[in-house]
Amino acid sequence: MASLNTLRTKFGVVLSVIIALALLAFIFSLRTDMGFSNNDPKVGVINGDKIRYSEYLNEYETVKANNGGSESDEAQADALANATWQGLIAKHMLLPGFEKMGIEVSEAERMSMLSGEHPSQVFYSAFADPQTGEYRPETISSFLSQVSANPQYQSFWSYLNSQAMLDRMMSKYLGMIRAGIYPNALEVENGVKAANESRSGRYAILKYNTIADSLVTVSQAEVQKYYDEHKNSYTQQPHRTISYVVFEVNPTDDDMLELEKEVRAAGEEFAAAEDVRAFVRKNIKGTIADHYVSAAQLGEDEAVVLDGGQYGPVLKSNEWVMSRAVATKMAPDSIGLSHIVLSAQDSALADSLYTALQNGADFAEAAAKYSTYAATAQNGGEIGVMPFSGFTTDMADQLAEAKKGDLIKTTVGDAIQILKVTRADAPKKFAVVGTITYPVEASAATRRNVHNTASIFAVDGKGSLEAFQNAASAAAVTPRVADIAQSERSINGLENTREIVRWANGAEINEISEIFNVGKDYAVAILTDIDDSKYMPLEDVSFSIMQEIGRNKKFDMLKDKLSGASIDEAAKNAGVEVAQFDGVKFNDYMIAELGLEPAVIGAIAATDQTGTVSAPVKGYSGAVVFVVDNIEKGDAQNAEAEKVRLQATMENMAMQASVMAIQRMADIDDLRGKYF
C-alpha cells in the first residue's frame, strides 16, 4: 500500500517536471511596485492580478506540504519558492488563458492518464515502481483507498491532479504550436545545400587596429542616436547594487593548539573503546560507512584498521580524522549475480518461486517469465559481476559467505528480489569503517573577536559610501560589489545570502546593514543604488556603443584600400598577406586563423561563383575580401533527412518563441524579494 511519505518523496522530482515541462522555466521581466492593503503587502503582480503576502504564503505551504515538507537548506527553499511562484503564474495567467483558448482536460482523459493509456509524467513520478520503473495503476487504487479518511491524503491527491491537468494542458498548447510548424521546399533546399557544400579559397584582412583610435571621433550625439535606435538590445531587470565586506573567521594558532589537544584526547578514548560501533554512533562527529572496503581501497596507512588498529588522529584537508573498523568480514572480492524482481505485494509468488528454484527450476526461464524488471528479465535476470565493496552493508552481509549456485531471497525497498550467485571469487578481508572527524575551525572566542570587529565597522561605516570605504580601509578589508536582480535570492561567491538579499530589497540608499552570517564568516553591506528602469543607463553602455560605432567608421576608412582585380592585388594594395581558408560551410562558426567571423562565413557560403574577388565584408576584427577557388559538393544530407532536422529545429524555436510571447504579454512583477 502506497504511503504518503513515499509518494511525497517520489513526487519531489515533479517540482522540476512542472517547472520544466508545464511552465518552461519562465524568467520574467520585472518592475518594482510595492503596495500595501489591510496589512497584507503586495508581493507581485501577475496578469494584472495583485498577489498578496497571504496568498503567496498559503501557496508556499501547500507546495511544501505536498513535496516532502523540507526546506532544510537554501537550495531546497529556493526550489520551493520557484515552484510556488510558477504555481501562482499558472493560476493567474496560464489556466485563464487556456480556458479562453478552449484547452481543457475531460474526466475521461484524466482517467486515461491514471490508467496509463495516455501516460502522465506527473502520475508516473508519483506512482511508478522505484525499483522497476513500471507504472502500476493498482498502486493508485491502493492509495485512493486511504484518501477518504485522511485529510492529508485528500490534499495531496487534489494537488497531484491539478499538476497533472496543468501539465496536460500545457502539452496540448505546445502541441498546437508544433502543429503549425513545417519547413517549406525552399528551406529544405537551402539546408541541403548548406550541409553538402563547402568552399575553399583565399582571403585578405585589413584589421581595424591598423587605424589609431585617436583618428576616429565618435560624438556623444552619435552614441545617443545609436542607443535610441538599438534600445531593445539594452533591456535589464530592475536591480539593487550593494557594496559589502566580509570578515573572515579563521582559527588562530591558539585555536589550532587547543583543537589538537582535544583531538588527541578523543583519539585515546577511541583507541580504548571496546564497542567501536557504539562509540562512533554516540559521537556527534562520528560516521559509519555504508559499504565494506578492502585494503586496495584504503590508503597504506589507513589499512591498519583491517587488523583492528586505529588510523589517526591525523590532520588531512583541514580536518582531523581518526578511524577504526566497526565490523570485518572475509568475503569474495567480486560476486556474479542474477535476479528476479517482484513487487512487495507478490510475497506468495516469491515464496513459491524460491522453493521451486531450490528444487532445481530453471532460473533464467523464471526470470524471463516473472521478473518485473524488464532490463534484466530478457537476459535471464543476469546482473553481471560486481565488487563486494559495491553492495550496501545490509546486502553485503547476506552475500559475504555466498558460494556459486546459492539462492538468496531478500527485500530491497518496495521490491522482493531472488538472487542467484553465479560467481564468487576468492575471499579477502573487508571492513566497515567508523570515522570521527574534527573540522579545523575557529573557537567561540575567536568568533566573538571577529564579530566585535565587524560591529565596530558597522558603526564607523554608516552614513555614506565614502564612510563605508574609509571604514573598510581602517579594518583592512576589501569592499566588493554585487548587483541583485529583483528575482534573485542569492549572491554569487557567498554562502547563505538570503537574508542579505531580503535586506537589500527593503533598504534605502546609503543604509548600512546589520551583521550577517555568511557561512563561517560575517558580512556587512551598504545599499549604493536602486535601478528600476527598463533599460540599462546610457553611461553604462556608452563605451561598447563607441566601440561599435568606431568599428563601423574604421570599416568605411579601410574598405577602399582592399581594392584590386585579384585577391593578390587587393592584398598588395592594402599591405597585407593573403591567407587560405578550406572547407568553409554555412553552419560553421569560425575560420582557422581568422577566428569568430560569422558575417565573413555567411558571405563565403553565399558565393556561388569561383575566381571573383568579393566586396569588402565588415568582420568583427577587420575588413575582409575573399575569393572562392573551389566549391566541393557532397551527399552528406538528403532532402528527407534535412526536412526532419528542420522540423525539429523549427518546432523547438517556435515553442521557445511562444513562451517569450507569453512573457511579454503577461506583465509580471516579482516583488517577493523584500519578504521571502
Image: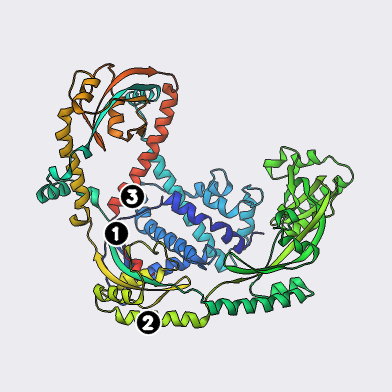
Q: Secondary structure at mark 1?
A: loop
Hey, which quadrant is residue 540 in on the image? Answer: bottom left
Judged by depth in the image, the label closer to the viewer, 2 or 1, is: 2
Residue type highlighted by circle 3: Lys
| Image spot of residue 409 (x, y percent) | 80, 53
> For this view, does 57 lie left or right of residue 276?
left
Residue linked to disc 3 = 100
> Could you tell me how far apart the alpha carbons at marks 2 and 1 are, in whole angstroms?
35 Å
| Image spot of residue 186 (x, y percent) | 32, 24
Which sits in the foreground, 71 or 141?
71
Judged by depth in the image, the label closer to the viewer, 2 or 3, is: 2
10 Å crowding of disc 2: few (<14), some (14-19), many (20+): some
Which sits in the foreground, 319 or 521?
319
Residue type highlighted by circle 1: Leu
Residue type highlighted by circle 2: Ser
Judged by depth in the image, the label closer to the viewer, 1 or 3, is: 1
Sequence-wise, the earlier of marks 1 and 3 is 1
Hey, which quadrant is residue 211 in on the image? Answer: top left
Residue linked to disc 2 = 455
Which sits in the foreground, 297 or 26?
297
> Could you tell me how far apart the alpha carbons at marks 1 and 3 are, in whole angstroms?
25 Å
Residue linked to disc 1 = 30
10 Å crowding of disc 3: few (<14), some (14-19), many (20+): few
Q: Is residue 52 visible?
A: no
